[in-house]
Amino acid sequence: MIFCPLVSGSSGNSTYICYKKTKILVDCGRSGKHIENCLRQIGVDIHDINAILITHSHTDHTQSAIILSKRYDIPIYASVGTWREMSRKFDATNMKSQNIRLFQSSSTLLPIDLGDFEAQFFAIPHDTAEPVGYRFTNGKMNVAIATDIGHITPTLRKNLFGAKLVLLESNHDVQKLLDGPYTQRLKKRILGDYGHLSNDNAGLFSVELIQNGTERIYLGHLSQENNSPEIAWRTVSNVLKNHQLDGKKDAEIFLTRRDEPSRISQY
């Protein structure tokens, strides 16, 4: 299984996952041209993408999803609430009906069959309609994506524990956010239970993930205004150290890149 965050941050998010002949994108939060270019950088042709899975409707996750679907005949998978909101923002007319594949986030239906592997969706705590994370399995191992999570829930633990690789949100440094120029209302939203996960909380949850079998963690969705790669890395590493864990020996901790593909993981 190949896993590569193409772009990750407050300005846009998209992740590439491949196993055998099945190639998918999770979110398309930058322009179609930018995502196509990122795919080319890792040797992938957009024409070979088999599906686009959407986590939630915010523009930094959906900007070019409908455009790419219509241009290259790619199915979009999304929760009903997510599709309702994103199709209001972007022109979904002339989309093929068979390329709109919806589910209820609270559904107990079987996982999404993507071909050579499958995806299980699960609810995440974020301030939009029916947001989800995804766990992918090829029958031998799991990888997972969980960003835009205001706090850690039992559902997150259930679906992320045991995943060999996790793309985990490490959005902001709390003090940097509090001292920054955002309005009090926006600061309260980000810090709330349905906002974004701080570096400190990402570190604490990384401890739990490592103790439950995770071997590789990508720190993602870093805020450009309220964080930096250096701060995120240092904070998470210190939390791990305080719990007698090493960010290089006990598990590998990687930083994602805002505008270009991050390190490729292959299992």
Image (cartoon, rainbow, N blue to C red):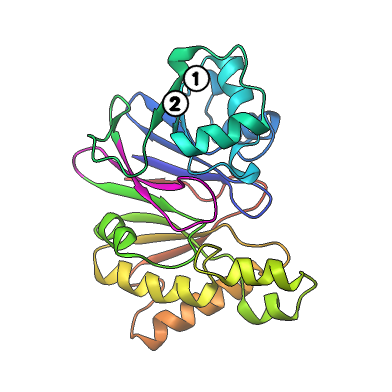
* First to last magenta residue range: 119-140
Image quarter for residue 40? Answer: top right
Residue furthest to the left in view is 139
Residue 132 within the segment the image draws in magenta: yes
Total numbered badges shown on the rendered structure: 2
Of the pair 176 and 38, the residue shown nearer to us: 176
Of the pair 174 and 220, the residue shown nearer to us: 174
Asked if 240 appears above or below 140 in the picture, the reply is below
Residue that appears at 69% across and 66% down: 186
Residue that appears at 52% across and 44% down: 56
Callout 2 amino acid:
Ala
Q: Which mark is residue 164?
A: none
- Determine whether, in the image, residue 1 is placed left or right of residue 259: left
Q: Provide the residue designation for mark 2.
A: 51
Task: Let me know if residue 226 appears in the view.
Answer: no
- Dot 1 falls on a residue whose secondary structure is loop
Q: For the C terminus, give its image quadrant.
A: top left
Image quarter for residue 33? Answer: top right
Are the residues flagged by discs 2 and 1 in contact, CB closer than 8 Å? yes
Across and down, in percent, residue 209 comes to 32, 67
Image quarter for residue 51? Answer: top left
Q: Provide the residue designation for mark 1.
A: 74
- Dot 2 falls on a residue whose secondary structure is strand
Callout 1 amino acid:
Ile
Across and down, in percent, residue 134 comes to 37, 45
First along the sequence among labels 2 and 1? 2
Residue 104 within the segment the image draws in magenta: no
Across and down, in percent, residue 106 comes to 32, 44
